[in-house]
Amino acid sequence: MKRLLLISLLAGGSPALFDEVPPAKTGITWTHNAGRSERRHLPEAVGSGGAFFDYDNDGWMDIYLVNSGPAGFFRPETPLRNALYRNNGDGTFSDVAERARAAGGVYGMGVAAADYDNDGDTDLFVTAHGSTILYRNNGDGAFTDVAAQAGVRVEGWTTSAAWFDFNQDSWLDLFVCSFARYTQEDWDTCGRNAEGKPFYCIPRQFEPASSLLFQNNGDGTFRRADGGTDIERAKGKALGVVTTDVNNDGRLDLFVANDTVQNFLFVNRGPGTDGHRWEEIALPAEVAYSLDGQPRSGMGVDAADVDGDGFEELFVSNVDHEGFALYRNNGDETYADESHLHDIARTTRLLSGWGLKFFDYNNDGALDLILANGHPDDMIERHKRDVQYREPLLLFEGKAGKLRDVSAAAGAAFAKPMSARGLAIGDYDNDGRADVLVINNNEPPVLIKNRASQHHWLGLRLIGTRSNRDAVGARITWSAGGVRRIRHKRGGGSYLSSHDPREILGLGAATRIDWLEIRWPGPSGTVQRLTDLEVDRYLVIKEAASAK
Amino acid sequence: MNAALICVYLCLFTAAAQDPAAYFKRALEFHQAGKIEDAVRQYRICLQLRPDWVEARSNLGAALSRLGHYDEAAAEYQTALKLAPDNFQARLNLALAYYKAARMQAAVAELSRLRTANPNHEQVALLLADAWFRLGENRKVIEVLSPLSSNEQNLAVAYLLGTALIREGEAGRGQVFIDRIMRRGETSEAHLLLGLAQLRNRQYPEAIRHFNRALELNPEVEGGLSLLGQALLGQDERERARKAFSQAIAASPNDFDAHFHLGVMLREDREIEAALKHLERAHQLRPSAVRVSYQIGLALLAAGRNEEAREVLEKIVAAAPDFVEAHTSLATAYYRLKRKADGDRHRETERRLRQSRQ
């Protein structure tokens, strides 16, 4: 028996859960160019992101990748451009960015994809060190930058962004993370390290900035909606944002990860006499700082109901020696950091995390977690023996309410050190298994195919008719094999990146779904119940005119 | 035997039994023979007969100290000093009793008095510096020992002074004393000092190498295991660090650093009750160390003992109003106790302090 086991191990044991798909197979040959310089400007270290989205509505997830470009501190020798990889439906992709007029041209950071004008096509908001871009999808395979006309052209340094309908008027609004003020004056005074070389400044040195909230007017334009609110008052260095519903009141709140200052938790208190009310409660909610009362270097974020109690937990990745945080929602607008109860605290102690996502990699119904890592400083190995510049991905499997590190069994893609920043999850081959896109800093991206699941699944594409068309904020509840589960359709999350907008519900061994219930976001709030659904396929569900 | 003769015998016997000098002599014999409990009994009888005998009381204190009864010993020395406030030996013994009882602040008070009266007494200066050292007051160590630094023969001075200088970031001045010790051959103390210098520079592997060598040369070298634990912790070898701190405490129950670092590790690993045990011991050893009190506050918060945490944290912010993390944690305690207004007040303070740091 032992011998058989040994032979099995020598032969490679069980197949890998994930496989990297090489550029030669996919045609994804684009490379991120950070514009690395001897001066080591901080923006060089933090980009970039990417998106899974279906720009041409052919049912296949396309890929958008953000590149650097001209900036005050960087003049590229040859023009750099973003990539828009059209999914050919056969495992290959074709870069159509130029033809689609979506090639960027700024020092790009991240991207947030959504149908902000409810016209049925997915649009892109690109953040940058410099001017932001709003690519309105023309519906004919091309985009038009309408940021200025729409009122969302932002100068400065913006990072992650989230589309969500905060006032439940059926139009997606936009939250944009502002990182810090970083001007020539700042980069000239950063200093040199022990070797006498310029180094990436610790963001503590830079002046914090308020993030921005744009309210969608429903006519293709936006207006600032943060004035006089806690969003304006809270000066941070925001890198990640995710929507969540802290207290299950049906209104979408915002969790913002900040670098070297406290995180923010903006609770949506609804309309007031002087405008919409936002209350920043991170400190009383105990998600602002580490348990030692120290600000950490928050980068990637996500939210999900990990323990199945109906309230959403929060996750933040931080830099090495700080530990990542998994905040359990106590149900009373407070949280408890329970990273130590999972494998999280121990496993992430020496890592620096960026993109991340709760998802069900094996479709067993329980949420798993993927983390993309890499130290921001390319000289770190000269100063710290226990930290590497390139770091591997981590995969945690959810079982009985606990997240267990299964990276060692996940395959070679999870042993490969990367300078990961953005991370997007999407099912690019429509096989019902969520694949992984890692966007590396100054290196090519990595597409990783999910080969894990033997379980049943149901994929949903929700289309709002009275609520926002992307159904951001919808609550999906389902029962399979007698087990009830809940998923929120959220905006934002990860780092600089945007995920496949479809939801894949893992059914485990169940061959049918008992029932599926969708609570559409406001203004309708319609609850739609479906039964007798066929599984192992994608369904398009349109919001019903009234409750069924 | 007639009645008169009996009376003579009894009277003679009673006179001898009532002679405190006889009891003192017998006590001294027992004391010198290492029969300490017998000596204590004889000293006590002697002092019942002659309570104002300073030498007997001082000796009783010494015997009690030998038995580890430091508080009782200190009481005897204090009584002796009331009778003879200028008695050098009694005060030195009192200081030593406090030192052995890990009551370092009390030891420092007595030794400071002795030093004022005897400014050139090298043993007093060394003991005072050692007590300051154990309180983490490296600047005071440097101040006390610098006048003695020219004595190249006194390696204890070189070790303490070198350590204090390195801990204060004065590596160049510290190196002089490392060299002085090294010239006397490879010693455990020299490796401790070299390791400490590396630890200060976060050169953990080198520090670990020196600490391990120091422990090879002398497994009982004071502070060796504790320093090894700190270096292991520095390079994130938490299990080995934990073991080193535990061994340090087993070898030296009053090792402040070992108690403190082990307490912090246990708190971080959410073993809160065990953490509190070590942190409270560290607090007893250095009552004025705010960082220890803060860790106790954090552990109490982690245990949900919010009212106790509030009390600890309130004292910290009263003593150290600029301790921003303490304001943050105190705000958390207030919020948990549903005292929103108090929470908001400290939240505002921490926000203001953090802004001023940016």
Image (spheres, coloured by chain):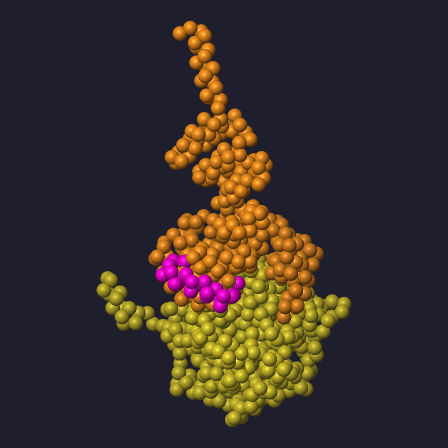
Part of the protein shown in magenta: B167-189
Residue A23 vertical position relative to residue A458 in the rendered view, above or below: below
The x and y percentages for residue A384 are: 45, 71
The x and y percentages for residue A436 are: 45, 76
Assess whether residue B168 is covered by the magenta stretch: yes
- Residue A523: which quarter of the image? bottom right
Residue B226 vertical position relative to residue A269 in the rendered view, above or below: above
Classify the position of the N terminus of chain B by image quarter: top left
The x and y percentages for residue B12 are: 45, 16
Q: What is the residue that sits farthest to the top in this orientation?
A: B2
Judging depth in this view, the residue of B9 and A293 nearest the camera is B9
Q: Is residue B264 visible?
A: no
The x and y percentages for residue A10 are: 27, 70
Classify the position of the C terminus of chain B by image quarter: bottom right
Identify the colour of chain A in the image.
yellow
- At 53% from the left and 63% from the top, the residue drawn is B168
Left or right: A346 as drawn, with respect to B325:
left
- Residue A165: which quarter of the image? bottom right
Q: What is the residue that sits farthest to the right in this orientation?
A: A273
Chain coloured orange here: B
